[in-house]
Image (cartoon, helix red, strand yellow):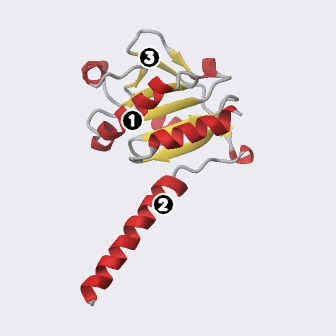
């Protein structure tokens, strides 16, 4: 009896965790709770600077990651797949705290596009990052509407829902 109760409790915890990751963790700020995104500029691997204010009028996803981050290695291909399938939004992978010499071969080996560099890790303060991966969702008016921290197996679904909600 005790083992079956333990297994029931474990199953409930797993379900609650999945519900949290899919429904609660990626919630959006309502319009009243949205706040302006910082005016940041990043160097990129393609040589053109990424200026966040230059992307007004479009939904922007900033995916903060690092090459040493194991959950990031799982999340990055899903985010890249979404970016390729949704050219109507801007998805930028922002490496945190690593020099170009580390980021460039990693990005090439993983087929990444639109990679920005923050070698000093200044985005931690600008975007209030508390771990990796962290996705920041910015609406077409340049306001932060959501922040999703941690590995999310449903990241593509969450991104699609955000794009649909914020583009209308």
Q: Residue at x 31, y 28 (%)?
A: 98
Write down the quadrant of residue 76 in the picture: top left
Q: Which residue is mark 2?
A: 19
Say if 101 sits above or below 59 in the image.
Answer: above
Query: For this rendering, which residue is in front, 1 or 128?
Result: 1
Mark 1 vs mark 3: give the one in front.
1
Residue 47: horizontal and vertical position, in percent?
42, 9
Q: Residue at x 45, y 34 (%)?
A: 63
Q: Residue at x 58, y 51 (%)?
A: 27
Outermost residue, right direction?
32
N-terminal of the pair, mark 1 or mark 3, is 3
Residue 36: horizontal and vertical position, in percent?
66, 35
Q: Which residue is mark 1?
A: 78
Query: For this rendering, which residue is in front, 149 or 19?
Result: 19
Outermost residue, bottom direction?
1
Q: Which residue is mark 3?
A: 43
Left or right of 34, for residue 9: left
Q: Residue at x 27, y 42 (%)?
A: 70
Confirm or deny contact between disc 1 and disc 3 (CB under 8 A). no
Left or right of 8, for residue 83: right
Residue 115: horizontal and vertical position, in percent?
40, 22
Tell me the distance, in whole angstroms, between the alpha carbons under discs 1 and 2: 19 Å
Q: Quadrant of the N terminus?
A: bottom left
């Amino acid at each position: 009896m005790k083992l079956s109760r333990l297994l029931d409790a474990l199953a409930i915890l797993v379900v609650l965790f999945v519900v949290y990751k899919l429904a609660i963790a990626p919630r959006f700020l309502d319009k009243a709770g949205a706040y302006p995104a910082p005016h940041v500029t990043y160097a990129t691997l393609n040589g053109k600077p990424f200026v966040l204010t230059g992307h007004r009028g479009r939904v922007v996803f900033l995916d903060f990651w690092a090459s040493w981050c194991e959950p990031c290695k799982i999340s990055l291909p899903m985010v890249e797949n979404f970016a390729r399938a949704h050219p109507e939004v801007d998805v930028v992978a922002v490496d945190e705290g690593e020099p170009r010499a580390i980021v460039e071969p990693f990005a090439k080996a993983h087929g990444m596009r639109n990679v920005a560099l923050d070698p000093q890790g200044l985005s931690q303060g600008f975007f209030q990052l508390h771990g990796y991966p962290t996705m920041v969702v910015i609406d077409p008016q340049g306001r932060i509407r959501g922040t999703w921290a941690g590995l999310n197996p449903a990241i593509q679904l969450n991104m699609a829902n955000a794009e649909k909600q914020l583009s209308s």
